[in-house]
Image (cartoon, grey):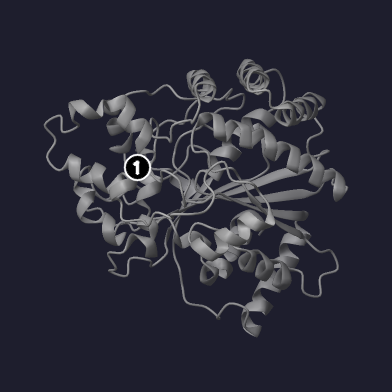
Amino acid sequence: MPVGNNFQHSVYARSDPGERLTFREVTTGAPPNSLAWQDEMTRLGRQMAGAGVRACLFLHGTYLGTDLFGMQRLDEVGGLKRGYSRGIAGLDALLSLMREESNGLPKLPQGPTPPFNDDGKTTSWLDEQAGDACNFTNAYVEAFNKALNRNASHSIDCRRWLWSSEQHHLGRALAACRLLNQLHTLSRELKLGPGDRLLVQAHGQAGLVLALVSNLLAPGESSGRDRLLQILTNYAKQTQAAELTEQLGRADNAIKAGNVLNGALLDVVTFGMPIRYGWDPSGLGKLLHFVNHRPMRTDGKRWLAKMELPQVTMEMPIAWGGDYVQQLATAVTDALPMTPDANAATKAIWEIVEPYDSFERWLECARKNVRCANDGRCLLVDYKDATGSTNPREHLYGHAAYTRLENLLFNTTEIVHALYA
């Protein structure tokens, strides 16, 4: 997307990404927390610190209690009572695999639901229930921190942040503003300045939150930013959310003052992010995307997802082609807001960030089979998670592999090689 993107949506381009694209396969290395593993992580930590990285923030939501594929919105715009088939054989079976009540993922009778709070009680519950599936656990972050900073002369501050997991435009926009405040606070705590870098690793839709952040951070005037912040402020006032109003005011002031990071650069790495919001590269340092992908096409276009819809129904239960959440949770999909005020705000934001709004448009976007975002470097990685198991809890349709502790060293190696070599 261009500098001055102003919240334009990504383009679903099937063309070869060229030099921006790299293919990788996960290799079996030293076991996590072994001495050899720690030695290699320590070496990578020195390289990151030498490149100016002062902090690393792990940003994630959760699939627990959420609409993983965003079928609520798709059902609404598709007119569920009218049926979906549209003469396309097998489509209803695919949509059944995507719906909450029939996707095979367990429903928790008790426990919190979105919006989630970023507190110790919630993250401990999440670690217990989800483990390291789509979840940067405390164990993951602590292992990263301990090994990365072993014997380091300049340690890298490592933290975890759970976003609300409200998977709609309003939820992601509010999360982007809250994240800006977190980054602003962190930059002051660590006394960051020019020459310093802050790295955010974001899983799934948390990557979309960062895409919005890139547009908010873009220098210069932005009609989209002004409009978005006004919608959020009006929503906060209508719902009498005093704390939210204060948070939005702080974010707006920091953006206008141009000191969110006090001159430091924000580097972003996404894992399994669906292709939706466009990025503004002028608001960022470096940008890298990981996508769980197996290049199995027979037409030579290895950078595209394997099969046309709806034939993927045969592959999805064993995650044969990679990350199906990344492929299918495209434009139009979303959870539905819980209140009329939230629904109205979401619709207003949709008019800024997404030009798609019908079942047919979702089908059109999903059929593009696009894996790589328009901006940044892209790693298409075979995470070797297609074990043949038909239990989606084990792989979450290819979306769970990125945050596994066993893949921490691989991920870090690739990040350092791509961004800080």
Instruction: Locate the C terminus by quadrant.
Output: bottom right
The one nearer the camera, 181 or 411, is: 181
Q: Which residue, as the protein is rendered here, is positioned at the far front?
A: 110
Q: Is residue 8 above or below residue 129?
A: above
The residue lying at 70 percent from left, 30 percent from top is 244
The residue lying at 38 percent from left, 34 percent from top is 333
The one nearer the camera, 201 or 105, is: 105
Residue 40, percent from left and from top:
65, 75
Residue 1, percent from left and from top:
53, 30
Q: Write down the quadrant of residue 56 in the picture.
A: bottom right
Q: Is residue 420 above or below residue 10?
A: below
Q: Is residue 102 above or below residue 347?
A: below
> Mark 1: few, some, or many residues within 10 Å (few <14, many ≥20)?
many
Residue identifier under label 1: 328
Evaluate whether residue 280 shows in this view: no
Locate residue 33 relative to residue 327 in the image: left or right. right
The residue lying at 56 percent from left, 58 percent from top is 126
Count all numbered tags in the image, as a single digit. 1
Locate residue 356 relative to residue 285 in the image: left or right. left
The one nearer the camera, 40 or 362, is: 362
What amino acid is at disc 1? Leu
Q: Which residue, as the protein is rendered here, is positioned at the far right?
A: 191
For numbered disc 1, what is the local secondary structure? Answer: helix
Locate residue 238 relative to residue 369 in the image: left or right. right
Q: Write down the quadrant of residue 334 in the picture.
A: top left
The one nearer the camera, 374 or 140, is: 140
Evaluate whether residue 23 shows in this view: yes
